Amino acid sequence: MILYLHNSLTRRKEAFEPIDANNVRMYVCGPTVYDYAHIGNGRPPVVFDILYRLLRHRYGVDHVTYARNFTDIDDKIMKRAVEEGTSIEDVSERFTKIYQDDMKSLGVLPPNIEPKATQHLPEMIAMMETLIAKGNAYEADGHVLFHTPSMDDYGRLSGHGQDELIAGSRVEVAPYKKDATDFVMWKPSSDDQPGWDSPWGRGRPGWHLECSCMIAKHLGETIDIHGGGQDLIFPHHENEIAQSQCTHGKKFVNYWLHNGYLTMTGEKMSKSLGNVRKINDLAKEFPGEALRLTLLSAHYRQPLDFNGDVIKEQIRRLDKWYRVAGDVEAASEAPQDFLEALYDDLNTPKALAILQSYLNSDPAAFKAGAQFIGLMQQTADLWFKGDVSAEGSDDAAHIDALVAERDQAKKDKNWGRADEIRDQLKEQGIVLEDSPDGTIWRRG
Ligand SMILES: [Zn+2]
């Protein structure tokens, strides 16, 4: 099967050919760990988790290296540390852990490497020294800047010409810049700010530099796939290209992939609109698999509108799936036509529609497909009853006993008692579903 991917650089769908089929290398920009991740931040890791699974399927589990970083130096982290009266390490370690938990609830496989910016200062300094020596960068007023006119194809990924960038004011004007589109790789730190010693004085790196350095160190000078949200194309990815291409004199990335935006009930998520939904909160309210399925319900390059109705629709879909295939043993391989849809630039809506068609006719094949994309990871019992271990098993046993008592009451035609138990459970948020095999219950 051929894997087709839409390359943002060529703006075309291309057949994927790795540099080395024994070691396919993918990098995705990770979070800046200064706050909780919102559900929009959850879309890239889930989308690229599907690609990671496809690459492992195509090339073998041991032949794919996937790196996703943690940005643990940033002015936003510094600001939060000051506000909380704590250290930047405390802030970044806390939110790194929360992010990893969030990814677990979304069913995202851990990447092979999770490098941190603070672990790569020597590599960053070396890259800036190389770029200065080559005439691509310069020092000014304690800063190190990349000089964009030093390369002839700056702006190719985003399609922004230099004139356009200046006219659109998408660049920060500063007196120490030779050209308005030059960008900062290093900036000075005051005594009360975190900083590292460098040939240009005590300072800290700009954001773009870390990804270029981590990629070169962990994956190589030219890699197969680089992914991220569409909002990172400019300036972040454009600047990663500039740094890496000029340092190594080689093409940086063969396939660039970007996912579309996520809106919340039709609106952009923003703090001022008060519609920011944290993954951490959503995962307490809804099953992680329903959130994951929601994120996969639209094609990754299309916008996705996230709202309560969509999540509930996916919960109902999963209810049906668990009812039919929850306790079925999965086939050894996912259905071929389902995989073909995924191999076609990760067409998850089409793949899900195909998968659905197997539910009743071949539940074992259905289940293999669902598990391939990280769904149907629990038993029907757990799905319908929620996380029993978290709630306490005594609680579950107590509910079981009440349900059994209600079944007996119904057999005895004691409708009053049966209704009473139903109402009592309803108050506790337990929903009962009567079926020919008996009554099943779930946390509603
Ligand atoms: Zn990056």
Image (cartoon, rainbow, N blue to C red):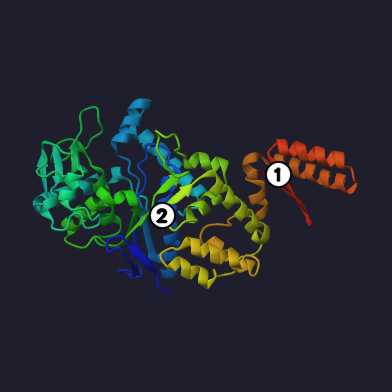
Quadrant where the image shows the N terminus: bottom left
* Marks 1/2: CA–CA distance: 38 Å
CB at disc 2 and ligand 1 closer than 8 Å? no
Instruction: Report whether 77 appears left or right of 434.
Output: left
SS for dot 2: loop
Q: Residue furthest right?
A: 412
Name the amino acid, label 1.
Val
Give me the residue at 48% from left, 56% from top: 296
Q: Residues within 10 Å of mark 1 (few under 14, many from 20)?
A: some
Nearer the camera: disc 1 or disc 2: 1
Q: Residues within 10 Å of mark 2 (few under 14, many from 20)?
A: some
84 is higher (above) or lower (below) than 68: above
Instruction: Report whether 166 appears left or right of 280.
Output: left
Q: Position of residue 120 (x, y in %)?
A: 26, 47
Checking the image for residue 431, the label placed there is 1
Give me the residue at 19% from left, 62% from top: 250
Give me the residue at 61% from left, 65% from top: 330
Q: Quadrant of residue 5?
A: bottom left
189 is higher (above) or lower (below) than 390: above
Name the amino acid, label 2.
Pro
Mark 2, residue position? 111
Checking the image for residue 77, the label placed there is none
Q: Residue furthest bottom?
A: 1
Q: Nearer the viewer, residue 431 or 74?
A: 431
SS for dot 1: strand
Can residue 231 be seen by looking at this rendering?
Answer: yes
Q: Position of residue 371 (x, y in %)?
A: 55, 61
Q: Position of residue 427 (x, y in %)?
A: 71, 35
Q: Earlier in the sequence, mark 1 or mark 2?
A: 2
